[in-house]
Image (cartoon, helix red, strand yellow):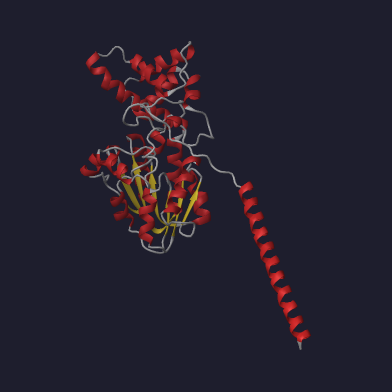
Amino acid sequence: MEDKMLNNGDFAGEEKIANKENKTNEENKTNEENKAKEENSVETPHKRRKRYKGTHPRTFAEKYKEHNPEKYKDTIEKVKSKGMTPAGMHISIMVNEIIDFLQIKPGQKGLDATLGYGGHTTAMLKCLNGEGHIYGLDADPIEIKKTTKRLEDNGFGPNIVTTINTNFRNIDEVAKEYGPFDFILADLGVSSMQLDNPKRGFSYKYDGPLDLRLNPEKGVSAAERIAKISQEELEGMLIENSDEIYATEVAKEIVKRNRGNKKIETTLELTEAIASALDFLPEKEKKDAVKKCCARVFQALRIDVNSEFEVLYEFMDKLPDALAEGGRVAILTFHSGEDRLVKKALKSGKKAGLYSEVSADVIRPTAKECIDNPRAKSTKMRWAVKR
């Protein structure tokens, strides 16, 4: 009996020792795993934001709050209340008018031919109420990645929206794979994210490389385009693309500088050339004239390097086949050249029996919207319904 009790005691003791050893082994294993994780992990050093002079940020890069709208909502609203567009953002134009016309219903399939910041797309997605799908096109490989993430962060993932990095001139290829579409939107304006970023060279207001390409990975920059152009060709471009009233003087100055030792490679250098070309104007008129001339010249160059008229003509030609029967299309234009092209194409389409209805007159943004967002002032909306 004592032997039995002793044996049982020995067994219990051995079991305690074994459990203790197992526990120690487990702890050692856990410690080793944690140590390995620590060795493999690389700590991201804290990066301080860029300092700026004065009490308020002035340059595009310095406006760190405007680049983070989700974090600094109060700052964003404050900027908007002053009739300005926050840096790195884009305020969508005529959203209500577009939604009213398109009459989007849950379950439908749509196309945003010019995705941009995704504001119009978001409004259209809300109309689907979780049923249906929207495809968004954008030629800009830089901005489409940001917009795709922005849409996902707002709850619109691949199940309801698909973004495609392609020019909207390829609408036929997109429609062949995903169409036809019940509704289509084309906003022909340049996004504020592109206009405000000096590195893209879209604006005369900021110094940067004279690029102006929607896709900086393709084609030639505006600086390369004007480097070898003749005065006659440049003058014709300025007249055709922006109705430039000082086309002769500006073209002459640009070509003279590029043929000499003052080659134009930046936005500031082009602005200086335009100002020099208008030196003959009275001083009190010159400042305003230079500002307006710069806007027209930059527009003309942007249209040229991106082949905007050719792209738009191709889009309008392929548009009817991309629409489903009874499908609706809304198009926003921003200058007379593209508006004439859209108007003519829609009118011809109705005459050919492709559309049952087209807009007789343009629809304009409200006075309040133009005050809240000055970039809306030149907007015109035209529409059509597929037969």
Q: Position of residue 200 (x, y in %)?
A: 45, 32
Q: Position of residue 16 (x, y in %)?
A: 69, 72
Please say if 224 is above or below 378: above
Q: Can the viewer see residue 88 in this picture?
A: yes
Horizontal placement of 245 versus 266: left or right?
A: left
Is 305 in front, or is 139? 139
Image quadrant in which the C terminus is located: bottom left
- Outermost right residue: 3
Q: Can the viewer see residue 353 in this picture?
A: no
Name the quadrant containing residue 309.
top left
Residue drawn where x is 43% and y is 53% of the image: 153
Please say if 348 is above or below 386: above
Please say if 94 is above or below 203: below
Q: Position of residue 185 (x, y in %)?
A: 38, 49
Is 79 in front, or is 51? 51
Horizontal placement of 208 versus 343: left or right?
A: right
Residue drawn where x is 34% and y is 51% of the image: 384
Residue drawn where x is 78% and y is 84% of the image: 3
